[in-house]
Image (cartoon, grey):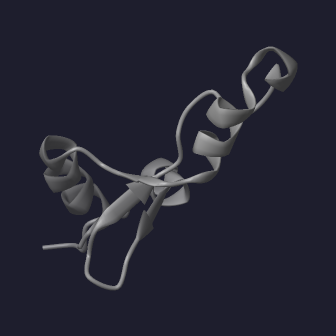
Amino acid sequence: MPKMKTNKSLAKRIKVTARGKLLRRRPGAGHLKSRKSPSRIRRFRKEIPLSPGFAKQAKKMLGI
């Protein structure tokens, strides 16, 4: 059986922590920041964990 390939589009967007949690960036932080409130812009800086349902799927796609 050949090795499974890593899904590269997902690998570029997700960070795996030392404990195996998957973190992602918040959407909407790319542009048009002048109309967004400062508190909202600050929130974009933090990474948030993937939902448990998708995290299971994502781990398979990453080969973890």
Residue at the extreme right of the image, as rendered: 34
Image x and y of residue 27, in percent = 56, 32
Image x and y of residue 21, in percent = 28, 68
Q: Is residue 63 visible?
A: yes
Nearest the viewer among 26 and 7 is: 26
Q: Quadrant of residue 22?
A: bottom left
Tell whether 40 sits left or right of 62. Answer: right
Nearest the viewer among 37 and 55 is: 37
* In the image, residue 48 above or below residue 53: below
Tell whether 19 sits left or right of 26. Answer: left
* In the image, residue 50 above or below residue 17: above
Image x and y of residue 39, in percent = 65, 35
Measuring 34% from the left and 85% from the top, which residue is drawn there?
A: 18
Measuring 50% from the left and 48% from the top, which residue is drawn there?
A: 9
Tell whether 50 sits left or right of 26. Answer: left
* In the image, residue 2 above or below residue 7: below
Q: Quadrant of residue 7?
A: bottom left
* Quadrant placement of the C terminus: bottom left
Nearest the viewer among 51 and 10 is: 51
Tell whether 58 sits left or right of 11. Answer: left
Measuring 12% from the left and 73% from the top, which residue is drawn there?
A: 1
Image x and y of residue 15, in percent = 46, 66
Q: Is residue 29 visible?
A: no
